[in-house]
Amino acid sequence: MTANEPDAATIAGPLTGVRVVSTAVNVPGPAVVARLVALGAEAVKVEPPGGDPLGAASPAWYAELSAGQQVVRLDLKDPAGCDRLEHLLAAADLLVTSSRARALERLGLGWEALHARHPRLCHVAMVGHPAPDDDLPGHDLTYQAALGLVGAGAPGDEPRMPVVLLADLAGAERAATEAVAALLQRGTTGRGTRREVALFDAAAAMAAPLRHGLTMPGAVLGGAHPGYRLYAARRGHVAVACLEPQFLTRLLELLGVPPGAGDLVERLTVVFGTRTASEWQAWAREHDLPLAEVRGVNG
């Protein structure tokens, strides 16, 4: 092997050899396990007898998030199902859960009991709210609502259903980081640890730009900056992100818009109305400018 060639571990993935067991269903747990599998881990997904609800809601996404994993269905309220789970945990490095603390206690998966039986097992516990509210019920919609993310339009606007499961997916990324941290710590101490990820906290971190006023209507990233906003085109809309002075200067030069005369937003609105959004996108790529056509969910 030469100095420039990757070794076998790098090719296989940094988590090659790590064995994950997950009892988490819906979106956050499957998303974090899919992330770990992409890094090389092996995973067994334990589903209830009726399967993961995500499979019925979105079969294609369910298949995507379960790819490369062994999926087993166990009734954890039945002794035989619990015994099978114990067998899986005995050979595992990491357990991922998304149940509330009292539910885990009922299943014998509370941390003290779990750690006593499997001292090297790491546990990433995904919960809705941080302690002492970790037994409060919730879902992505309620976390976003509580943080102002479904009513962040102009004053008087009706709240809208979120188009992205922000808390679930941000929580999954955070949980993947915590999983790696737990495994690294075990490499030093030889003992597993429990790491908790609250989806509300993950959503709160994603809401920081709004909380600090950066993306509020009329703020710098909320439409006030003429080089960072949406414009109507002759057909469709364009998203212009010429935030840096050099990009904005180049945009204005290429469009023939003087920077110091009158309202830039008004003048750019007129100019962008002369072509379709797709034409503007092609033009921007030709001139190395950050501009994109606003597309619908299906393109």
Image (cartoon, helix red, strand yellow):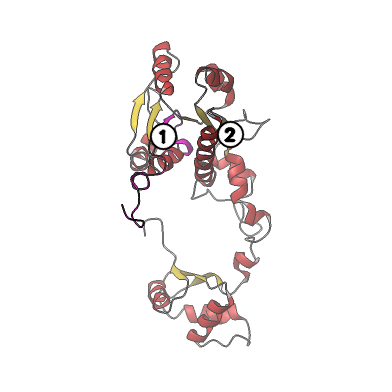
Between 139 and 29, the one nearer to me in the picture: 29
Amino acid type shown at disc 2: Glu
The reply to whether residue 166 is in sight is yes
What is the x, y in percent for residue 247? 53, 77
Q: Which residue is mark 2?
A: 196
What is the x, y in percent for residue 254? 48, 85
Assign the magenta stretch its main secondary structure.
loop
Residue most extreme to the top: 79
Name the residue located 50 percent from the left edge and 25 percent from the top edge: 120
Name the residue located 33 percent from the left edge and 42 percent from the top edge: 60
Mark 2: which secondary structure? strand
- Disc nearer the start of the sequence (1/2): 1
What is the x, y in percent for residue 176? 49, 41
* Magenta region, residue range: 1-30
Q: Which residue is mark 1?
A: 18
What is the quadrant of residue 21 in the picture? Answer: top left
Name the residue located 49 percent from the left edge and 49 percent from the top edge: 164
Name the residue located 46 percent from the left edge and 40 percent from the top edge: 32
Amino acid type shown at disc 1: Val
Q: Is residue 3 left or right of residue 199?
A: left
Mark 1: which secondary structure? loop
Q: Nearer the viewer, mark 1 or mark 2?
A: 1
What is the x, y in percent for residue 173? 50, 44
